[in-house]
Image: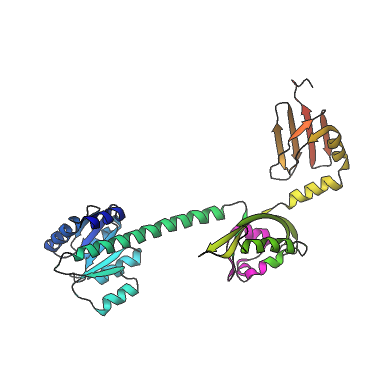
Amino acid sequence: MNAFKTIIKNECKNIKVLYVTDTPQKFSIFKYSIERITSSVLVFACYSSESAVKTFDKYDCIVANLNIHKMNGLELAKAIKKEKDFPIILYTDSRNGDIIKAVFESIVDDYILMEKDTEHFKLLINKITMCVERSRFKKSFEKCENELNWLIEHSLDSIAKIELEKGITRYNSVFQKLFGFSESEIKNMGIKMLELLHEDDRDKFMTELDRLYSHKIKQYVTLNRWYTKSGKIKWIQSHVYSIFENGDITGIYLIDRDISEYIKFYKNIQKKDSKFINLLDKNILYDNFQYSTNELSTRTPRFDATVRYIGASNIITLPIKIVRDLDIKIGDKISVKIQKKENDVS
C-alpha cells in the first residue's frame, strides 16, 4: 500500500474528479475509497447528468455511473464530447458491447467494473491518472503547436518543411510569396522543389544534402540561386536542418532569406563603381566588408562611419580604420560619408 501511495503521489498532481451518480450513499463510498488511498485525487459530487454537462469544465476528469436516471453515463459522455475532448471514465456493474464500442469510438476514454473488493479503486486511480495526464499532455502539445505556428507564420524568413515521402508539408506565407506558387501548386510540388535550384548550384546543394542524410552533419548554411514560378532567379541564403524520426532522417527544414538585393548591390560596387572601390582602397584599411542597406553607423573608439544605401532594408557591419576624411556620392542610390572624430589627433 505504501509503495502504491508513493507512485500515485508522484504521478497525480491536484486531480479534481467529478463523480456523477444518483445517490449520496454511492458518492460517500466512492469518495472515501479514493481519498483514503491518495490525497492527490479530490472527488466532487454531481447527482444529475444535466448538471455535469454544465459544470464539467471546472474539473479534470469525470467518472460516471452507467445507470443514471434521465441521461445515462454513455449519453452524458456523448453530450460532453460534442463540446470538448474531455477525460471520461464509465463506472459500471456490467460489461457489455455498448461500453466496449464506446471506448473504441472514443466516446469514453475508459471504463471500470464495480467490485465489492475496494482494491479495484487502485486500478481506477491509475486509469484516472493516465486519462488526465494524457489530456494535459495533449493540451500542452497543442499550446506549443499553436505558438510554433504563430512564430512560423510571423517570421520574416521563408520557412518550409520538406518530407522525403510527402514533399512540402508545411510552409509560411513568406515562402509562398518568395517563390510565387499557389497553395495547390505547392501541395502538388512534392520534392520536385529541389528542381527549382539553378543548374550550376544543384551539385553543391545536393552534396551538402547527402552529408546531412549520412549523419555527417545536422545542419548547414548555403547560398544558392533559385528559380521562382515566373522564371526569375533569386539569390537565397538557406539554413538547412534535418528532421529526425526514430533515429532516421525523414526530411528537412528550409529557412530561406532572399539576399538578391545585397548581391546586386555588392556586384554593382565591384564591377561598376571602381571610383568608389579605389577611394576605399586608398583611404581605408578594412578587415571585413559585409552587406549593408538603409543606413549603418559603426562607432569605434576613434572613428565614425556611415554607409547609406537608399531603397534597401537590411543591416550591415563595416569595421574600418580611416586614414583621412571621405565624402563620396556615387549615382542616386549610394552615398558614403566617412570622417574622423573631432578629438582624433592622428
Q: Is residue 149 a member of the stretch shown in magenta? A: no
Residue drawn at (43%, 58%), measured in percent from left and top? 141
Q: Position of residue 130 (x, y in %)?
A: 32, 62
Residue 238 in view here: no
Which quadrant of the structure image shows residue 230?
bottom right
The mark tally for this picture is 0
Q: Position of residue 193 (x, y in %)?
A: 67, 66
The foreground one among 94 and 260 is: 94
In the rendered image, the vertical position of residue 249 relative to residue 155, given as above or below: below
Please indicate whether residue 310 sits to the left or right of residue 151 in the image.
Answer: right
Residue drawn at (16%, 59%), measured in percent from left and top? 33
Residue 269 in view here: yes
Which quadrant of the structure image shows residue 99?
bottom left
In the rendered image, the vertical position of residue 322 relative to residue 209, given as above or below: above
Color scheme of the displayed model: rainbow
**Quadrant location, the C terminus:** top right
Please indicate whether residue 242 sits to the left or right of residue 207 in the image.
Answer: left
**Quadrant location, the N terminus:** bottom left
Q: Position of residue 29 (x, y in %)?
A: 13, 61
Q: Position of residue 192 (x, y in %)?
A: 67, 69
Q: Residue furthest left?
A: 25
Which quadrant of the structure image shows residue 277?
top right
Q: Residue furthest bottom?
A: 97
Q: Is residue 173 a member of the stretch shown in magenta? A: yes
Please indicate whether residue 57 sits to the left or right of residue 313 in the image.
Answer: left
Residue range (magenta): 164-193
Residue drawn at (86%, 34%), measured in percent from left and top? 282
Please indicate whether residue 43 sits to the left or right of residue 254 in the image.
Answer: left
